[in-house]
Image (spheres, rainbow, N blue to C red):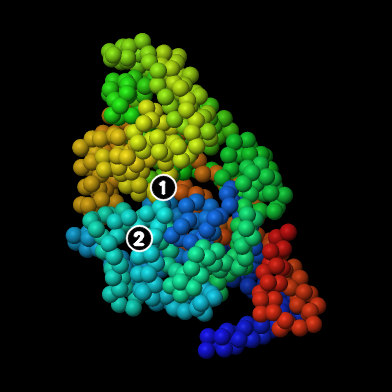
Amino acid sequence: MLKRYRKLALFVAIFGVVSMVLAACSSGDDSQTANQTDRKEAAEGENTESGGILNIGLSSNAATLDPSLYTGVYEGQIMRSIADTLIVYDQDLQSFIPSLATEWEAADDMMSYTFKLRDDVYFQPGEYQDGRQMTAEDVKFSLERSVNNSAQNRLAGVESVEVTSEFEVKIHLEEPNSALLAMLTDQGNIIIPKEEVEGWGDQFGAHLVGTGPFMLENWQTDQQVDLVKHDNYWGEEPHLDGVTYKFITDPSMRTNALRSGDIDIATHIKGQNREVIKKDENLELLSTPGLSITYLDMNYQQGPTANPKVREAISKATNIEEIVQGVHQWGGGTVAHGPLPKGSWGYDESFESVKAEYNPEEAKEILDQTEYAGGFEIDLYVLESRTNYATIFQNQMKENLNVDVNIQVSEWGTLTETISNNNAPLSIGGWSWYPDPYFFLNPRFHSSQHGSNGNGKAYENSTVDELLDRAVTETVDQEERAALYQEAVTEILEDYATIAFDNLDIATGVTTKVKGFNLSPDESIYVVSPNGANISIENNSAKRSRNLFCFSLFKRSSIHEHKNWCRYNWASTKNRSNT
């Protein structure tokens, strides 16, 4: 029955394509002009044209698009266009807005959350289902799969998901946790169809099917992933025909690809490439402080830094401004004022007056009050990519405190093992996550996280523990939670538990023809989203794409030679539309 349906659907699709091609090849510009007008109005008055392929350059290859297995930001970028979560952040990352869920409510005891779902959502057609309606059973399957299989524990604390009606679910928690909503925005918690997951098995990560605005069309390993528009998408119709994500790991090559027009958006722009893009009149460098902190942690339980006076001396002997200027001579980082980035809604300007001020003379006096007067020797563990921070810090400690810092460059596995086992006297790391303060403070400063990479320094403060616990168990109100987090940060800063170096910028280069792109502090690229995003391309060559397709279609003797032929050629001509 399913095969018969597919054959019928194929016939209808081919007939429809041929009809559209005939109309497009013979009707001139009238219908296109009308369509352009509609798109312009939808794009809030911007000079946009419907159609075209948006080419995005990513800094790393994608290994998998399986929501339970993915680990990289770059994979999440692709997944974000194919599948949806229950809720999403607004473009300012300050509040949640509906996506697949229309509304939600926490129980009075905060032990469960109830979500009402849209009833007009359909999956993209796949190998094992033909675009059926999404229901609460799909939400239960997807979220419980994340709970049980997630490589990154992206839905921690969820006990079970209960289907209460065809379009309503209740998520039960092991304990109250007001950070649940932030977790649900993660691409690891997208909603997917059970048939496709079970049908593809271990290969599902190469054949992701979701409810999003674009469908996976083609994946060239280590080169690019091509997506095409999902015509039955429940949200605002995409302005684009498709999106191509190209893997360009070399930063200079990525910048050159942007300049030559091979890509329209280049992610992860750093160093001198920032200046190259700034000087190109056809490009624009978008840069904003991101949800990312680079920091130095001091061992709280062992060695010289177990002494609070030593931690205070090191903190006051560290010239953070000099470190940031030295590391970011081309821009790309701003001075941090504590363990929360400015993009988090828990950040408060009062942190700037609480953190230690650079005062090398006072720092030396404080150190002289300890058994380490006159200086000492200490190891600093760091990744090779952050040795520039370590070298400047090393020079400052020698000059200001006569402390000899031995830089121990480690690869990721060794570094995390050393830190987690509380064997790093000093370490430099980076932390990036959701804007909810829970994800920056709990993993790094709650005593329950001893033995983890976040709190391998073994920081412990009962007052901080209490404040962090209250912030997730007492209330879901954001203002009330922010006040508790601000108290906790003040305690942490007064303990000299860490030195925050910089708040890394998220920097992206775009061509001037890209319209509607919003640079997010969490580095997420939303091509089309319920949060209002809908990227378009100004003056693209959609008409040329159509003509190329007309030519390729009628050049063939038969359009029935292979069921994927029309689909392939249409995608191929669209891929050339911005050349």
Please tell me the numbered disc located at residue 101: none
Name above or below for residue 512 compared with residue 373.
below
The residue located at (53%, 52%) in the rendering is 74
The residue located at (46%, 43%) in the rendering is 290
In this view of the protein, can residue 157 be seen by the observer? yes
Q: Taking 363 as reference, is 30 left or right? A: right
Q: Which residue is mark 2?
A: 147
> How far separated are the C-alphas under marks 1 and 2?
19 Å
Q: Which residue is mark 1?
A: 433
Q: Nearest the camera: 180 or 280?
A: 180
Residue 353, position in %: x, y?
33, 29
Q: Nearer the viewer, mark 1 or mark 2?
A: 2
Residue 514, position in %: x, y?
62, 56
Q: Taking 331 as reference, is 260 left or right? A: right
The answer to whether the residues at label 1 and label 2 have Cβ atoms under 8 Å apart is: no
Residue type, numbered disc 1: Trp
* Crowd class of label 2 (few under 14; some 14 to 19; many from 20; radius 10 Å): many
* Crowd class of label 1 (few under 14; some 14 to 19; many from 20; radius 10 Å): some
Q: Nearest the camera: 351 or 250?
A: 250
Q: Quadrant of the C terminus?
A: bottom right
Residue 545, position in %: x, y?
72, 68
